[in-house]
Image (cartoon, grey):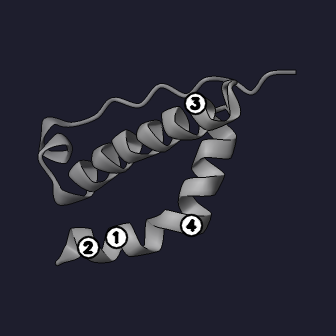
Amino acid sequence: MLPRQINIVVDERFKRSKMYLILRQEQVEIDKLKWIESEKEGRDIGRIRAVFLWTRYYREKWLKGFNE
């Protein structure tokens, strides 16, 4: 059984917040990693694996650089 989709209305103030900007940029970085790793393997690695790899190997250093 598939989980239900949750619809969230995002306030414009949130879209201008630092938290939103960080989350949005992080999604861009995960997409880049997904593309690079998929190219290396010759197949789509999937979103879940890309998020795992990003979190495991790159996120902490990226956040430190983002906050400087």
57 in relation to 37, above or below:
below
Q: Amino acid at mark 1?
A: Leu
Q: Secondary structure at mark 4?
A: helix
Quarter of the image holding residue 54? bottom right
Q: Give whichever of discs 3 and 2 has the lower sequence position.
A: 3
Q: Secondary structure at mark 2?
A: helix
15 in relation to 35, above or below:
below
Question: x%, y% of residue 49?
Answer: 68, 44
According to the image, label 1 marks what residue? Answer: 63
Q: For marks 1 and 4, give the one nearer the viewer.
A: 4
According to the image, label 3 marks what residue? Answer: 39
The reply to whether the C-beta atoms of the residues labelled 1 and 2 are less than 8 Å apart is: yes
Question: Which residue does the image show at 45% across and 74% down from the upper left?
Answer: 60
The reply to whether the C-beta atoms of the residues labelled 3 and 2 are less than 8 Å apart is: no
Label 3 Cα neighbours within 10 Å, binned few <14 / some 14-19 / many ≥20: few
Q: Quadrant of the C terminus?
A: bottom left
Q: Give whichever of discs 4 and 3 has the lower sequence position.
A: 3
Q: For marks 3 and 1, give the one nearer the viewer.
A: 3
Question: x%, y% of residue 30?
Answer: 46, 44
Question: x%, y% of residue 20?
Answer: 26, 49
According to the image, label 4 marks what residue? Answer: 57
Q: Secondary structure at mark 3?
A: helix
Question: Which residue does the image show at 40% across and 74% down from the upper left?
Answer: 61
Distance (Cα) linking label 1 and label 4: 12 Å
According to the image, label 2 marks what residue? Answer: 65
Distance (Cα) linking label 2 and label 4: 14 Å
Q: Amino acid at mark 2?
A: Gly
Q: Residue furthest right?
A: 1
Q: Secondary structure at mark 1?
A: helix
Q: Is residue 46 left or right of residue 61?
A: right
Question: x%, y% of residue 7?
Answer: 47, 25
Label 1 Cα neighbours within 10 Å, binned few <14 / some 14-19 / many ≥20: few
